[in-house]
Amino acid sequence: MRPCCRAAASSPAVPDTAVTAGVSDLPRIEPARPGVTVIEAWLSEFPFPGFLDAVRERAAEFERTHPRYRIVIRGFSYEKLPAKVVRAAASGSAPAIASYYSGASQLARDTRTADGAPLFVSVEKAIGGRSEILGEPVVIDDVLAGVREYYTYDGDLASMPMTLSTMLLYANTTLLERAGVPRTPRSWDEVELACKAVAGLPDGPAHGIAWPVDGKFMQHALAQQGGLLTDASNGHAGRSLRVDLTSPELLAYVRWWQRLHQEGHYLHTGVMEDWAGTFGALAGQRVALRFSSSFDANYMVRAAQDAGFGLEVGPLPHNDTVPWAGNWIGGDSLWLADGLDEATRDGALAFMQYLSSPLNIARRHKASGSAPVTGASVALLEEEGWFDEHPHHRVPVEQLALRGGPPSAHGALAGGLHGIQMEMMAAMEDVLTQGAPAGERFARAEAEAQRILDEYNAWALGTGPLTPETLAVRI
């Protein structure tokens, strides 16, 4: 594939070696069999044991119900999968289904076939208003509102959300009760008050709260306040062309974070993206509060039980001065290749809907901690009493319902998002450890983030080369 093919004929030609390099390491597509339609599904692997085992079980079930189909599940590192799909599309061997982490959604939209056409088609367009496909009920209209809004581009649901996460608060209620804190904090002001109370304990921890220096927390703070990371309504009303790292919403969060650190309440482990370190801080009762992913709930609850302290999981505290607008949306979504023959297209769509049945979403939720993505799956879990027995798993659903802003509030659709996040994190590190003025430091980060976005867009529009950062993906 030549990137120039994706733009107007006047666009300059650019080398295609970066795209086509490494084609030899792509899997050999399983050939069709007489009377059997083969559907290749390339899915993200994450660093959890047996992450795709349940999906492979669902594929086997689907094949038994639909014996004319063979579902081939191939797992790849979530970091490397988008680049593999780009190369496969260039060589004409792209899968029918590919999963992308939420932050790589723009990359999915910009991936092209060898003739320059978009590789993927909107799932909603492909469904075409049908209520069932091959006997499998269509569930796209039941996707939770905030999640559906995030994955809706150009008026259609572009992909089928499969896994779902967001950011939550984890609180040591034993320490909070000893400190006289009446309830788990729900706002930034309440976090500060709780930290001050914990600091007053004669034998309490040295710090009140911890969370990793990670760009997703800054994105979530923006979403909660209705702030935007990029122009064009966070990329939902057109391509993101400008990055904004000096918005009032982002700087309000940065300065609040900095104040917590300066006053000795925030535990900075000295390592960026230190999920393990902050986990250990709460598990070891070296802090009373921790911000982390909803995927951490099972592990955090088990650690609290082992250590003998009470744990409450709650919504991520927000800026009390503005209404709650939205939430950062994490997880993987399934994208459908365009131009498939009817049998392959409908088989792929039916498999997506089967994976998203209430029962199968509930199974996935119980096995992995991924939040349920449809109303019917939430209702099923409620009816089974699952949330009553595991109240920490109800919290993500309740938090995702806290949405008063426009669809753009749920997070940015932008290329080069990994690199942009890294610039945000580096700036935050300097604010915390060197006392850098927040506005000045994030203005410098914005300039570098803009360069990353510009280089990505040049590649996507066919006017520039593929740089190492273009296909970089991180959770």
Image: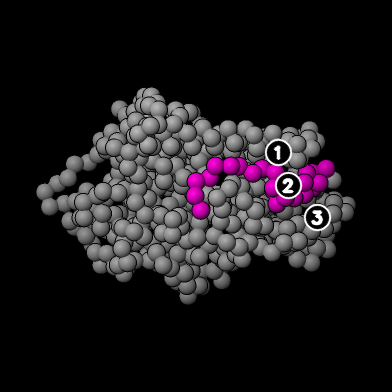
Q: Which residues are magenta?
A: 237-262
Q: Position of residue 131 (x, y in %)?
A: 31, 69
CA distance separating discs 3 and 2: 17 Å
Tags 3 and 1 in contact by the CB under 8 Å rule?
A: no
The tag earlier along the polypeptide, 3 or 1, is: 3
* Residue 442 badge: 1
Residue at image position (60%, 60%) is 326
* Residue 192 badge: 3
Amino acid found under the numbered disc labelled 3: Glu
Tags 2 and 1 in contact by the CB under 8 Å rule?
A: yes
Quarter occupied by the N terminus: top left
CA distance separating discs 3 and 1: 24 Å
Q: Is residue 92 visible?
A: yes
Amino acid found under the numbered disc labelled 1: Phe
Left/right of residue 127 with respect to residue 425 in the rendered view:
left
Q: Which residue is mark 2?
A: 251
The tag earlier along the polypeptide, 3 or 2, is: 3
* Residue 71 badge: none
